[in-house]
Structure formats: structure tokens, C-alpha cells
Image (cartoon, helix red, strand yellow):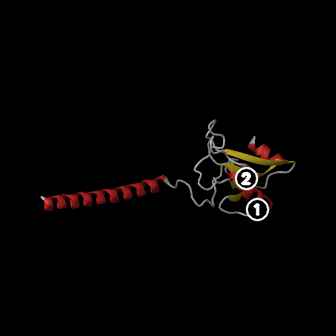
Amino acid sequence: MKERLLTECELHTIVRLSNGVFAPYTGIKTNVLFFEKGRPTTEVWYYEHPYPKGYKSYSKTKPMRIEEFEPEKAWWENRVENEFAWKVGIDEIRERNFNLDIANPNSVEGGHGDPDESLALYEKERAAAAEVREQLKQALAEALERAA
């Protein structure tokens, strides 16, 4: 179905909205897809809508506001890749079996990373914390002995 849609229509833009846009009803991420019928898709632009400064998520009391879309409006007419925007060619989408869930390669935050690397870093940090804890215990024990 996706292949047919991308062959018969041009999916030119996907705007990825942040979590909580429809809170409290759902926390699922939402994408807005823009199509034009009559020509095939050659590339898809993605724009990842960031949270406003100071927000960690949207909620019923902190909803998304229309003013937040000013950066998207400015970008729409003069599209360039940046930390929020990237494009993907149809060949890559075909290789992914038409899976459109493509991570932002320009993200400054990055993803979760490789699990093995994360676990190795965790173990290293844990060992360092244990060493500092032992040094503190030893220093406290010495201080107590001197005070006695």
C-alpha cells in the first residue's frame, strides 16, 4: 500500500510532532504527511518540530500553540537541511521497505546509541563511583579514628 501511494502521489513533506500533542488522550508521536496527487515521490523532506524552550512535553495545561510553527513556515519556502530538517531519497525509502520512520541524522541530541556501548559506559561509571565511595569510606574511617 505504501509503495503504491508513493508511486501515485508525491509525499513531499513529513512534519514530525513531539510527544504529548494529543495528551491526555495519547502519548504516541504524531506525523503530518503532505501529498500531491499525480506524480511519484522522488524525495521526502522531514521536519522535526521541537518543543518550545522550557518545555519537556506538551500536556492539557501546556498545549501546542500555532505560533510555534513559525520556523516551519519560514523553512517551507526555502528548504535547507538543518538540525530539524533533512531529506531522504526514494531509493533509500525503497531499501527500507517503504518504512517512513527515519531518524533525524542531524539531531544534536542523537539517539540512544548502541546498547553495548551504553552498557560498557555504565559499567565504567559504576566502577568509578564505587571507587570514590570506597575512598570516602576510608577517609571517614580515618577521621573517626583520629577523633577518638
Q: Residue furthest right?
A: 38
Which residue is labeled 2 in the image?
Answer: 67
Residue at position x 79%, y 43% in the image: 4
Element marked by disc 1? loop
- In the shown orientation, is residue 3 left or right of residue 107? right
Instruction: Report the front residue among 113 and 93.
Output: 113
Q: Quadrant of residue 106?
A: bottom right
- In the shown orientation, is residue 30 left or right of residue 145? right
Residue 88 in picture, x, y percent from top left: 71, 57
Residue 2 in picture, x, y percent from top left: 74, 43
Which of the two marks, 1 or 2, is nearer to us in this view?
2
Which residue is labeled 1 in the image?
Answer: 79
Alpha carbon of mark 1 to alpha carbon of mark 2: how far?
19 Å
Q: Quadrant of the C terminus?
A: bottom left
Q: Amino acid at mark 1?
A: Arg
Residue 135: give its label. none
Q: Quadrant of the N terminus?
A: top right
Q: Amino acid at mark 2?
A: Glu
Residue at position x 63%, y 59% in the image: 105
Confirm or deny contact between disc 1 and disc 2 (CB under 8 A). no
**Is residue 89 visible from the viewing direction of this image?**
no
**Earlier sequence position, callout 1 versus callout 2:** 2
Element marked by disc 2? helix
For label 2, the crowd category at 10 Å Cα-Cα, with few meaning under 14, some 14 to 19 and many 20 or more, is: few
* 61, above or below 83, in the image: above
Residue at position x 26%, y 59% in the image: 136
**Is residue 93 visible from the viewing direction of this image?**
yes
Residue 5 in picture, x, y percent from top left: 79, 44
